[in-house]
Image (spheres, rainbow, N blue to C red):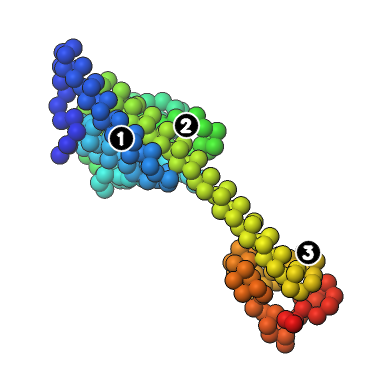
């Protein structure tokens, strides 16, 4: 059951009303999508949005390319993964080709579509899907250059999707692409912030060890590296310990201090 645009109006006035409805819908969709920081979360929401806005769609999903192939994200039922699995196995089909060739594909009847004869036959026989509409998401951000994804709609009847459906899926895809670009930019910014904080913590920890043990910066770093290796913990965690305790735990156990800890000369045991 669709709770969005349930019936396709006809005539100029009716189409104008549909346009106004779409503007309202996409205003809400855009505001919601801008809040995400994870790419797959956006892809999941795009699937449900597409199925809600397009009453001719029985199912929806998004496809994303990975190093070893493709993966289906946000399927609205168990049907899209079954259909997509056939495409991924064969290496072609509406959603795969839409992503790889940057085109929109409207498959009116998969049983007789000459572009994908084997896929169409298997999709119809194994899943009951006869129509598909697939559209690639276009990313202008250079940081998204390696990301390839597309929106997919599925229907059990032939010739399910028309030009209005093609326009709507294009609008949804545009909103989704902007949202994904924003999500990736937020994630990169968060990563940079975290890295800067880690570097600050490590630098502060080095200063603590240098002041307490009267060692050089290189010697202090070696000690933190040894502590990291011995405890199988990350350097940032070791730095946090130093900032909290003022020392390294293994320095409080003189009998366990090996030669490598004394490479810089002197006695590394806690005073």
Q: What residue occupies the far bottom of the structure in this picture?
A: 255
Of residues 71 and 175, which is closer to you in this image? 175
Q: Residue at x 38, y 35 (%)?
A: 176
Quadrant of image for the C terminus:
bottom right
Asked where in the image residue 232 lies, by quadrant, the reply is bottom right
Residue 205 appears in the rendering? yes
Q: Secondary structure at mark 1?
A: helix
The numbered mark, 3 or 1, whose residue comes first in the sequence reads: 1
Q: Residue at x 23, y 36 (%)?
A: 52
Residue tagged by mark 2? Answer: 139
Q: Secondary structure at mark 3?
A: helix
Side (left or right) of 89 relative to 131: right
State yes or no: discs 3 and 1 in contact (Cβ < 8 Å): no
Q: Residues within 10 Å of mark 1 (few under 14, many from 20)?
A: some
Residue tagged by mark 1? Answer: 29
99 shown above or below 44: above
Instruction: Give percent across and percent down for residue 172.
Output: 33, 31
């Amino acid at each position: 059951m669709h709770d969005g645009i349930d019936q396709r109006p006809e005539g100029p006035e009716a189409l104008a009303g549909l346009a106004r409805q779409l503007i309202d819908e996409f205003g809400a969709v855009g505001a919601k999508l801008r809040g995400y920081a994870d790419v797959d979360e956006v892809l999941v929401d795009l699937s449900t949005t597409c199925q809600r806005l397009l009453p001719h769609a029985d199912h929806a999903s998004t496809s994303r390319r990975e190093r070893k192939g493709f993966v289906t994200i946000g399927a609205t039922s168990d049907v899209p993964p079954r259909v997509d699995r056939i495409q991924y196995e064969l290496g072609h089909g509406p959603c795969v080709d839409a992503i790889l060739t940057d085109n929109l594909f409207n498959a009116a009847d998969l049983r007789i579509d000459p572009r994908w004869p084997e896929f169409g036959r298997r999709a119809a026989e194994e899943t009951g899907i006869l129509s598909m509409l697939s559209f690639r998401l276009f990313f202008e951000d250079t940081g998204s250059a390696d990301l390839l994804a597309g929106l997919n709609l599925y229907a059990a009847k032939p010739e399910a999707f028309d030009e209005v459906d093609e326009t709507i899926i294009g609008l949804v895809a545009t909103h989704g692409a902007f949202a994904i670009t924003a999500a990736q930019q937020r994630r990169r910014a968060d990563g940079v912030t975290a890295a800067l904080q880690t570097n600050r913590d490590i630098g502060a920890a080095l200063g603590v060890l240098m002041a307490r043990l009267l060692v050089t910066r290189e010697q202090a770093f070696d000690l933190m590296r040894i502590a990291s290796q011995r405890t199988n913990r990350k350097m940032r965690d070791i730095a946090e310990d130093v900032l909290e305790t003022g020392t390294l735990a293994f320095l409080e156990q003189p009998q366990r201090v090996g030669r490598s800890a004394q490479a810089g000369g002197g006695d590394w045991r806690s005073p």
